[in-house]
Image: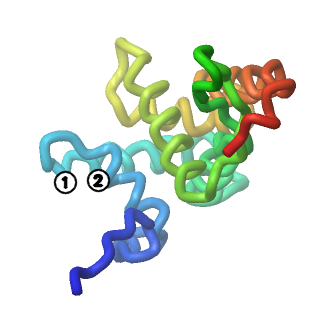
Amino acid sequence: MAKKFTASYEQLKPDPVYQSKLASKFINCLMWGGKKSVASNVFYDAMKEIEKKISDVSPIEVFETAVNNVKPMLEVRSKRVGGSNYQVPMQVGPKRQLSLAIRWILAASRGKKGKPMSLRLASELMDAYRKEGAAMTTRENVHRMAEANKAFAHFAW
């Protein structure tokens, strides 16, 4: 019998600095081309920047709160019913919430230009911690879309 694959971050080893499995998962998602050392340096430099700017809270708390703030509760999925497509609002599972939150934070960080990635990431994480910024805007748009299509909720499968 083949071993079942799970994409959960619970199986990961915690990162060496903060002992956080979430940070380890985030570093893996940040990594491009198998260059984990580069991704780790970017993440830890961002954490140092957060520590400089927000001194009253530990940087790992800022990071975890930012990811939790960006997690969506609802999303819309396309469902075909009788020849027409409907955008059906659905609840998001915990794994998908995490992956969407990480993806949106990284996309927002990569979308900013003109500064090193560690500063862009620190900026986006601090914005998400304060419930503002591009990743939070994406979350709000997804929620707004789900709210607007509430009438089609009975098509949920």
Q: Is residue 1 above or below residue 59?
A: below
Q: Is residue 138 left or right of residue 29?
A: right
Please name the residue shown 79% across and 22% down the image.
149
Question: In this rendering, would 80 be left or right of 22?
Answer: right
Where the N terminus falls, by quadrant?
Answer: bottom left
As drawn, the residue found furthest toward the right would be: 151
**Residue at the extreme front:** 82
Q: Position of residue 31 (x, y in %)?
A: 25, 45
**Regarding mark 2 in the picture, which secondary structure is present there?**
helix
Residue 18 seen by the camera: no
**Circle 2: residue type:** Ser
Give the number of marks: 2
According to the image, label 1 marks what residue?
37
Name the outermost residue toward the bottom: 1
Q: Quadrant of residue 42?
A: top left
The type of residue carrying mark 1 is Ser
What residue sits 72% from the left and 54% below the top? Answer: 56
Q: Which coloring applies here?
A: rainbow
Along the line of sight, the residue nearer the viewer: 103 or 92: 92
Q: Position of residue 116 (x, y in %)?
A: 32, 26
Q: Is the residue under label 1 in contact with that under label 2 (CB below 8 Å)? A: yes
Q: Position of residue 96 (x, y in %)?
A: 54, 50
Image coordinates of residue 70 in percent, x first then y, are 65, 40
Name the residue carrying label 2: 40
